[in-house]
Image: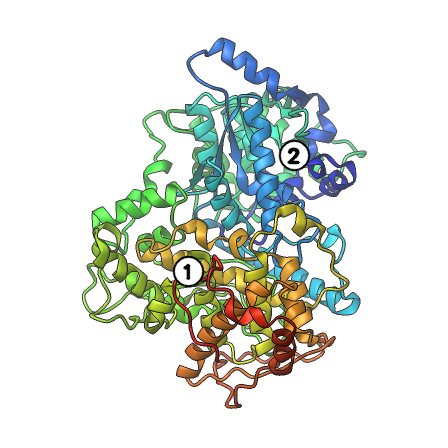
């Protein structure tokens, strides 16, 4: 965890003059990113103009004071996890798909530092993208696409990972962070609406000692103290606490003005584009204008000066709404101010008979799932971070997926959104069987991939998977018990990936390997450009990863980075999220922990195996000289090749040597990417395997006791 306190890395988080620090800190490549975090420029304003509002605090001392004042309740910090993920991911390698065991160890160290101080942590994650933020979400996705294209150009040119200034989160990092924290025994909450509201409400209602994050909205909410993740020194548990009282004193307003102040500067409800004229009026009349400040700072001061001089009442709010060019929606300010009121709070800007109903708004919408018991269970599992994407589909038939580290100029590998769409269609069919008769509702997908302009959601038709006896309903899959139901869950899961005929072979494997093989077999069937070398690299990865510690993986050094392997690593990680969704829909035939990346994937190790495989190294070298892995390797390879050949997909050898994609050819968008190759199966290891077995004749008879292969052996091909 020393990296968290490294001053060199700390410099990466410093704020620019005109942009909010929290926008640079947030998790851009995530499933449910906040479109903007708080009021633009407010965090920097506090640091530059009112430094007295930034007080260094010792969290251990605050926790001890809380224990004295409240002996019956432990000190709790509620964590806005989405604004911390970027700070938590400190492994040196980030471009290869994620150093998941290293990351898990970092999270564990983070938690243990607070446990040692007697502080309980509660982690909150965004669970939705609210419709009012969709436009901004799309803008950020397009920006991320450009950044990722620049990243791939660098990798192809220099054959290495760029510096941290080009850092992009590994694909699906926030999703797996949520499950990682849960697996480490932490209370982890996935929200039903924007996370900052629920974080602020939890902090207030549970008398937390503070909120840990990086979002200036926590200066606007009337809630518990707000601590900075950016300034946290984990070894000493010292950070910066931002003071609302000092901020209000500098601005010359009271805390009751803060919600209106935020709205008149532009936020998630009131667009900045409607406020330019108002800002100009404030700037021309403000006595606080200072030429040494930038324009945004002067706007903040002049808007505060303006509202300090008007009566704090609902009529004043209505007057402002009439004055501003709000178009047909004259209630924007009202809704904006109301959005900052936590349960039980009132504001002089809002009539006293109005009750804040934000927390109940979701229950009022019409859900696609009409079975109340199933819907309630899905909702509970969503909140408790036990399922993945299920509630979003059952509630409003909508699902999002942000950017992945995919090379848009690689013409051979389709976007992961397209690769996994057939599996998702099967999952949608399983979920939406209830109460809709014979016609399935369409599912709205907002998935980022090359060729999708994101002008509107794609409407996806659910497709019934091929399950013997028909697809079981959700009540059977989720609530029934017994060995027959367990078999139904497993077979339905496999049917999502066209693997229902391989149930016996897959059940013979240890669970993480079975899940990995499901994904790998599906990938090999769906993507015709994947070769035997790719297959060998993936199989060597899963077998050699067993038993490697986080420290061993940290020490692994790569001579170069291959851009195609970067792309394939991201595709595989997104495939794991598809496994999570299928597992959730089918009633958990697997433990979720068995489908996590730290159980089956490491970015650097995959890069190494990929390069070894394509450069034609011996099987002995690929398997690190571990002869006990030979038979499991051959058996897994035989299983996947058999599955593919049964579907007329013959995997061929395509060694790439030291070749790297040039990226010179602009890809043409073509969703018909599943044309199978017709060439014969010829193993690239045909000769190398002969040498391997001659040097190690006993290896052919070993492997049956290997933990990855419990009781069933396929005959070698």
State whether residue 69 is above or below residue 474: above
Residue placed under numbered mark 2 in the picture: 43
Residue 554 visible in image = yes
Judging depth in this view, the residue of 262 and 195 nearest the camera is: 195
Q: Nearer the viewer, mark 2 or mark 1?
A: 1
The mark nearer the N terminus, 2 or 1, is 2
Residue placed under numbered mark 1 in the picture: 710
Quick check: 68 left or right of 436?
Answer: right
The residue at the far top in this view is 68
Q: Position of residue 231 (x, y in %)?
A: 68, 31
Q: Are marks 2 and 1 in contact (CB under 8 Å)?
A: no
Residue 309 visible in image = no
State whether residue 53 is above or below residue 401: above
Judging depth in this view, the residue of 602 and 633 nearest the camera is: 633
The residue at the far front in this view is 698
**Count of marks, rendered view:** 2
Quick check: 475 left or right of 628?
Answer: left
Q: Secondary structure at mark 2?
A: helix
Q: Position of residue 483 (x, y in %)?
A: 23, 56
Quick check: 301 left or right of 344?
Answer: right
Which residue is pictured at 74% across the width and 69% down the height?
A: 156
Judging depth in this view, the residue of 20 and 208 nearest the camera is: 208
Q: Secondary structure at mark 1?
A: loop
Quick check: 149 left or right of 421?
Answer: right
Cα separation between marks 2 and 1: 56 Å
State whether residue 606 is above or below residue 379: below
Which residue is pictured at 29% across the width and 43% down the height?
A: 363
Q: Residue 53's mark?
A: none
Q: Position of residue 579 (x, y in %)?
A: 42, 60
Quadrant hosting residue 699: bottom right
């Amino acid at each position: 965890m020393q990296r968290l306190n490294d001053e060199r890395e700390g410099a990466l988080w410093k704020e620019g003059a005109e942009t909010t620090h929290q926008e640079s800190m947030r998790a851009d490549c995530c499933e449910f990113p906040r479109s903007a975090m708080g009021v633009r420029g407010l965090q920097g304003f506090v640091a530059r103009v009112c430094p007295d509002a930034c007080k260094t605090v010792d969290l251990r001392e605050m926790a001890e004071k809380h224990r004295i004042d409240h002996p019956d309740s432990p000190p709790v910090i509620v964590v806005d996890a989405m604004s911390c993920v970027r700070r938590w991911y400190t492994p040196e390698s980030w471009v290869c798909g994620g150093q998941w065991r290293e990351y898990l160890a970092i999270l564990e160290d983070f938690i243990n530092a607070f446990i040692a101080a007697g502080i309980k942590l509660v982690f909150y994650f965004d669970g939705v993208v609210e419709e009012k933020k969709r436009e901004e979400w799309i803008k950020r996705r397009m920006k991320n696409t450009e950044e990722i294209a620049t990243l791939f150009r660098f990798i192809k040119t220099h054959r290495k990972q760029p510096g941290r200034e080009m850092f992009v989160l590994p694909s699906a990092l926030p999703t797996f962070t949520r499950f990682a924290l849960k697996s480490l025994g932490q209370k982890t909450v996935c929200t039903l609406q924007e996370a900052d509201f629920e974080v602020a409400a939890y902090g207030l209602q549970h008398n937390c000692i503070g909120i840990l994050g990086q979002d200036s909205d926590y200066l606007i909410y009337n809630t518990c103290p707000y601590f900075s993740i950016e300034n946290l020194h984990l070894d000493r548990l010292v950070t910066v606490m931002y003071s609302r009282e000092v901020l209000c004193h500098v601005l010359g307003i009271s805390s009751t003005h803060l919600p209106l102040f935020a709205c008149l500067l532009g936020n998630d409800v009131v667009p900045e584009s409607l406020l330019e004229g108002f800002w100009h009026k404030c700037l021309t009349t403000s006595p606080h204008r200072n030429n040494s400040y930038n324009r945004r700072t002067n706007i903040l001061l002049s808007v505060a000066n303006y509202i300090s001089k008007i009566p704090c009442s609902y009529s004043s709010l209505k007057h402002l709404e009439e004055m501003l060019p709000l178009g047909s929606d004259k209630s924007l300010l009202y809704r904006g101010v109301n959005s900052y009121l936590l349960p039980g709070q009132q504001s002089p800007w809002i009539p006293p008979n109005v009750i804040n109903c934000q927390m109940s708004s979701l229950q009022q919408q019409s859900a696609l799932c009409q079975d109340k018991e199933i819907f309630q269970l899905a909702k509970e599992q969503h909140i408790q971070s036990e399922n993945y994407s299920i509630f979003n589909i059952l509630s409003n038939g909508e699902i999002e997926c942000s950017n992945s580290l995919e090379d848009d100029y690689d013409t051979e590998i389709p976007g992961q959104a397209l690769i996994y769409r057939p599996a998702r269609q099967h999952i949608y069919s399983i979920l939406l069987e209830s109460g809709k008769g014979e016609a399935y509702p369409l599912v709205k997908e907002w998935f980022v991939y090359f060729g999708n302009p994101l002008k509107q959601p794609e409407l996806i038709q659910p497709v019934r998977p091929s399950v013997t006896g028909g697809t079981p309903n959700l009540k059977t899959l989720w609530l029934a018990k017994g060995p027959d139901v367990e078999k139904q869950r497993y077979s339905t899961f496999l049917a999502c990936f066209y693997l229902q005929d391989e149930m016996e072979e897959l059940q013979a494997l240890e669970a993480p390997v079975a899940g990995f093989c499901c994904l790998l077999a599906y990938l090999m069937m769906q993507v015709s450009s994947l070769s035997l070398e790719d297959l060998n690299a993936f199989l060597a990865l899963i077998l050699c990863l067993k038993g490697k510690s986080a420290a061993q993986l940290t020490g692994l050094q790569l001579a170069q980075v291959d851009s195609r392997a970067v792309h394939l690593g991201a595709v595989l990680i997104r495939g794991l999220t598809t496994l999570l969704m299928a597992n959730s829909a089918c009633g958990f035939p697997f433990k979720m922990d068995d489908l996590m990346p730290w159980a089956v994937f490491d970015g650097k190790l995959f890069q190494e195996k990929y390069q070894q495989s394509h450069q034609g190294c011996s099987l002995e070298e690929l398997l690190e000289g571990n002869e006990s892995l030979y038979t499991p390797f051959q058996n897994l390879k035989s299983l996947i090749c058999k599955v593919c050949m049964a579907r007329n997909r013959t995997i061929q050898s395509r060694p790439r040597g030291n070749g790297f994609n040039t990226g010179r050819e602009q890809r043409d968008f073509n969703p018909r990417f599943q044309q199978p190759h017709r060439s014969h199966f010829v193993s690239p290891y045909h000769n190398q395997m002969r040498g391997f077995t001659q040097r190690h004749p006993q290896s052919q008879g070993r492997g049956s006791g290997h933990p990855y292969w419990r009781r069933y052996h396929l005959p070698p091909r």
